[in-house]
Image (tube, rainbow, N blue to C red):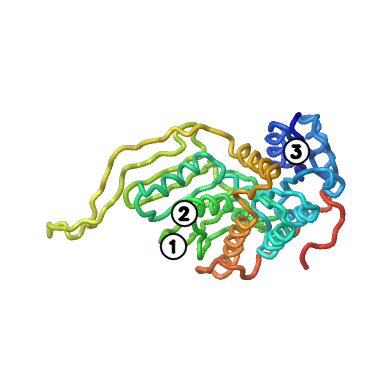
Amino acid sequence: MPAARTNVAVVGYGYWGSKHVRVLSSLADVSVTVVDGNEDRLAEAAHHYPAARLAGSLDAVVEDVDAVVVATPPAAHTLVALVALEAGKPTLVEKPLATSVAEAELLVETAESRGVPLMVGHTFEYNAAVRTLRDIVRSGSLGRVLYIDTARLSLGRYQRDVNVIWDLAPHDISIVSYLLDEMPSSTSVWAQCNIGDRHADVAYLRLQFPRSDAHAFVHVSWLNPDKVRRVTVVGERKMVVYDDMSDNERIRIYDIGVDPAEVDDPSSAHAMPVTYRSGDITSPFIPFDEPLRVQDQHFVDCVRSGATPATTGRRGLDIVRVLSATDRARLDGGVVPVDDGPVAITEPAPATVIVEQRSPVLS
């Protein structure tokens, strides 16, 4: 007897939505419904995926699908996801889960009260290189982690409804907290708006992880000539660089470091009392499997089995709390705790193109 097909609605056929449609259409026993209020985008989807069902609103098809992927602009995530969750449909929301702590909490509470799986698209947690990096960190071979430095830079894509931190930093906050198995307790931020006057397009974050006694420094930019996707982990004994732009050797382990030393020669008292170590550079072989495919297959598997996703709604809520703290840090100009304090104020995106007109989610 043939397996029953799983029908997944992808809401929003933009940059990420089109990628989800491509991946889901390639999975076994999965049918795709593309939801978008833009007729040109629906026509494009029909051209590339003639087997896909098309709809102008989620309300029109939500009862007929098994699960929903929300790939709209971030400010519309809450409104669209609520339609899916209230209909009892397992839901995958692209990062960030929502644009405020209050809305993220609402989504988590709605999902939990109805017993509906809620998953967040923290794609790098499904990346084989990041999982290998996590294994290296947890093996203790690096020694105590002193700090982690990340860079996520490119020319664009400028977003209408969120700044560069909310757009790019969710990936790095997710990666660093995944590596350390700990959420940051506080943050400080420097950010600047260079093009126009709407959103910061370059930012530097400092995150403190008290249990690990480590710090992370996150650099994100929409205004950089080169595309950079890099994570550097500096340990007491060794260091590791993960370069997502590398075709091979995406992880390089450096057996190098600096140790404190006694100064025996009085004439060298002015020098820094350290010694330098240098050794081999190694790069483990990591078979490539597209992270988005791994993530979306995991989502479909959870839909079919009822299992809890690896990146739950609460995981997404934790990331939104950090993002909200960065907004407060920008205003305060100092170090602020990560908690459920005042939420970010964002301009709502028009969501009526993808769901029928509904009352506002939050006042």
Q: Which residue is labeled 2 in the image?
A: 180
The earlier-in-sequence mark between 3 and 1 is 3
Q: Position of residue 261 (x, y in %)?
A: 21, 56
Residue extending farthest to the front is 1
The Cα–Cα distance between marks 3 and 1, rounded to whole angstroms, is 42 Å
Amino acid type of the residue that numbered disc 2 sits on in the rendered structure:
Leu
- Between tags 3 and 2, which lies in front? 3
Where residue 67 appears, x then y in whole percent? 75, 45
The residue depicted at 64 percent of the width and 50 percent of the height is: 308
Which residue occupies 53% across, 69% down?
336
**Secondary element at tag 3:** strand
Q: Is residue 168 left or right of residue 91?
A: left
Q: Is residue 200 above or below residue 41?
A: below
Q: Nearer the viewer, residue 45 or 87?
A: 87
Which one is nearer the viewer's eye here, 193 or 285?
Answer: 285
Tell me where residue 344 sits by quadrant: bottom right
Question: In this figure, which residue is indicated by the disc labeled 1?
Answer: 211
Q: Mark 3 vs mark 2: which is more N-terminal?
A: 3
| Rendered location of residue 301, percent (x, y) | 66, 41
From where the camera sits, is residue 64 visible?
yes
For image coordinates 59% across by 59% down, the residue present is 318
Q: Which mark is residue 6?
A: 3
